[in-house]
Amino acid sequence: MMTKEGLPRHDVLLNRAVEALAAYEASIASSDPKILNRYQRALAEVVSIVAARTFVSRSEMLAAWQTTSSRHQKAILVGMTTLGTGYLFGSDDPKKGLDCSGLVAFAWAESGVGLPLKSDRQIDRSREVSREAARAGDIVGYPGHTMIYLGVGDIVLHSARPNLGVRVGPINWKESRNIKFADPLPVD
């Protein structure tokens, strides 16, 4: 989603994610049902676009996002606000660029969870869960790469390599048979 000059292209998904994150923040700060309803509508718009782009069930993805924790929801939305950001090895600063672990660290830091800036350590620091128990917002990783799981099928948000930057797409199962799913939230 970059132009040949390396600038982010206009992306309606990015715009909707920014709006949904703002609506999320407003809903956390208020007990007004109208504000919560605005957030739910904004979340549904983001899900509709992601589901259409990735050819997965909108209703399944919406249910996955609505039933995960609020911190998982925020991590997803924060991550979505970085769509189109270029790849920069070792960076967790979306103004400069993000590598895979930088994207995951940035999204979860905004949700109040500190993660190391190394993909293998992010998985080690988190509580491993089965693929069946994985929730939207959990970390997906294999040696050398981490991603944010979007809750349905193989769909993730990640910063894969320099020519792609932050994007939504399927897990590349050919890369590794050692894929793990992990929840970065501390166990209470």
Image: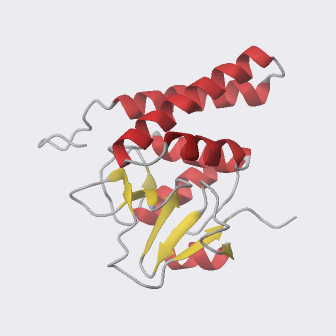
179 up-or-down from 99: above or below:
below
Q: Residue at x 72, y 18 (%)?
A: 35
Relative to 187, is 145 on the left or the right? left
Residue 161 in the image, given as x and y percentages of width and height: 28, 64
Would you identify the image quadrant in which residue 41 lies? top right
Relative to 104, is 160 on the left or the right? left
Residue 54 in the image, given as x and y percentages of width and height: 37, 48
Relative to 7, is 132 on the left or the right? right
Relative to 163, is 181 on the left or the right? right
What is the image's colouring? secondary structure
Residue 87 in the image, given as x and y percentages of width and height: 31, 57
Would you identify the image quadrant in which residue 130 lies? bottom right
Residue 115 appears in view? yes
How many numbered circles are shown?
0
- Give the quadrant of the N terminus: top left
Q: Residue at x 79, y 18 (%)?
A: 33
Residue 4 in the image, given as x and y percentages of width and height: 11, 43
Residue 23 appears in view? no
Would you identify the image quadrant in which residue 15 lies? top left
Q: Residue furthest left?
A: 4
Q: Residue at x 51, y 58 (%)?
A: 148
Nearer-the-camera pick, 100 or 51: 51
Q: Residue at x 40, y 34 (%)?
A: 14
- Give the quadrant of the C terminus: bottom right
